[in-house]
Image (spheres, rainbow, N blue to C red):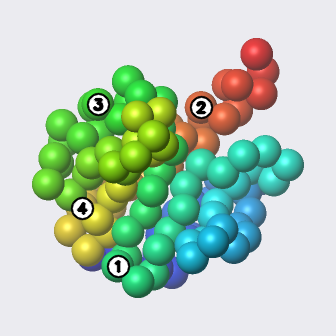
Amino acid sequence: MIPSEAFAEMALSFPGTGQKPHFDRIGFNIIGKRMFATYLSANNTANIFLAPEEQVIFCKMDPVNIYPVPNKWGEKGATTFELNKVAKEFVQEALLSAYNDILQKKKE
């Protein structure tokens, strides 16, 4: 299980990151750039914004607890992680991937 404080610590461990409210969630972004993850305390889930090809890989790792968000955002790579059940290592790796994706787009 990954409690909310642990998820926030993981998401904020990357250089230049911040957090801010995002509707009923907490959003995590690179300051001055877009969000790479959100957290919902009501059900202890995180949506991590992966590249679509990365989403496929993570969903295969644990298809019951890692799955596309069931809407247009999910088709673009937004992926739900059930933090009560998914391995911490998967979440850390997904956060890093989403964070790096934003940095790469900044350079292009």
Residue 5 seen in render: yes
Q: Is residue 19 left or right of residue 75?
A: right
**Amino acid beneath label 1:** Asn
Contact flag, marks 3 and 1 (Cβ < 8 Å): no
| Residue for badge 1 | 43
Badge 3 is on which residue?
A: 56
Residue 51, percent across and down? 48, 30
The answer to the question of whether label 2 and label 4 lie on touching residues, with beta carbons closer than 8 A, is no
Q: Which residue is mark 2?
A: 101
Q: Residues within 10 Å of mark 1 (few under 14, many from 20)?
A: few
Crowding at label 2, few (<14), some or many (≥20) Cα neighbours within 10 Å? Answer: some
Between discs 3 and 1, the one toward the N terminus? 1
Q: Is 70 placed above or below 8 here?
A: above
Q: Residues within 10 Å of mark 3 (few under 14, many from 20)?
A: some
With 55 as the anchor, is 14 left or right in this view? right
Numbered tag placed on residue 68 in the rendering: none
Q: How many residues crowd mark 4 within 10 Å: few (<14), some (14–19), many (20+)? A: some
